Amino acid sequence: MTKTLFTVFACLLFIFTACKNDNKIASSADTSMAQKNLEASHIVNKAFETGDASMIDSAVASDFVDHSERGDVGRDSLKAMITSMKKEFPDMKMETIKELADNDYVFTMMRFTGTSNGAMGMPKGPYDMHAIQVVKFKDGKAVEHWEYMQPGEMMKMMAPANNKNSADSTRKKTK
């Protein structure tokens, strides 16, 4: 519930900020830093699609923190996740629906499609999920990352695995 509220709040804040028209003209320094942040974000996305984590050091700071369901993890954990996700979701495709960037953040609305091999708690078979990626940048490198998914999609994704676990625990209790 907290993640959902935060996601809604972050999106509304970003929309209101983006819609505000106070006739400011972005300086070329502002534009170039936002572009540099987008390029770094694209490097990370490409690494996830290809499974090649070799370019991560050029786009992600050494003190990077990924605020994930596994807790806060660093750059080395990100590299390991890239490698394991390629094995577990070999045909994963990532479609960028919308991305917005400034000097400090890149917000990306994404669609993930492919086939799960049954790892990571997901049922085997095709998947189609959406998420919002929020990445904080400093000096053109990612320093923090958050990901938010729609609760309904998370429940559909996990439902068969949860139902299996529930059935297994019910069987154990009745024996």
Image: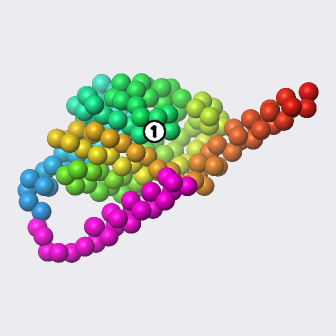
In the image, taking residue 48 as reference, residue 40 lies left or right, namely: left
> Magenta segment: does it hold 8?
yes
Query: Residue drawn at (60%, 30%), measured in percent from left and top?
Result: 119
Residue 16: image location, x then y, percent? 32, 70
Assign a secondary structure to mark 1: strand
The colour scheme of the drawn protein is: rainbow
Query: Residue drawn at (28%, 72%), measured in percent from left and top?
Result: 19
- What residue is shown with label 1? 68
Residues drawn in magenta? 1-25
Q: How many numbered marks appear?
A: 1
When the figure is inspected, residue 171 is found, relative to residue 3, above or below; the finding is above
When the figure is inspected, residue 125 is found, relative to residue 77, above or below; the finding is below
In the image, taking residue 60 as reference, residue 95 lies left or right, namely: right
In the image, taking residue 67 as reference, residue 141 lies left or right, namely: left
**Can I make out residue 79 in this image?**
no
Give the image quarter of residue 168.
Answer: top right
Q: Residue furthest right?
A: 175
Residue 123: image location, x then y, percent? 66, 37
Residue 172: image location, x then y, percent? 85, 29
Residue 152: image location, x then y, percent? 60, 55
Q: Residues within 10 Å of mark 1 (few under 14, many from 20)?
A: few
Q: Residue furthest front?
A: 2
**Can I make out residue 1 in this image?**
yes
In the image shown, does 53 or 50 lie closer to the viewer? 53
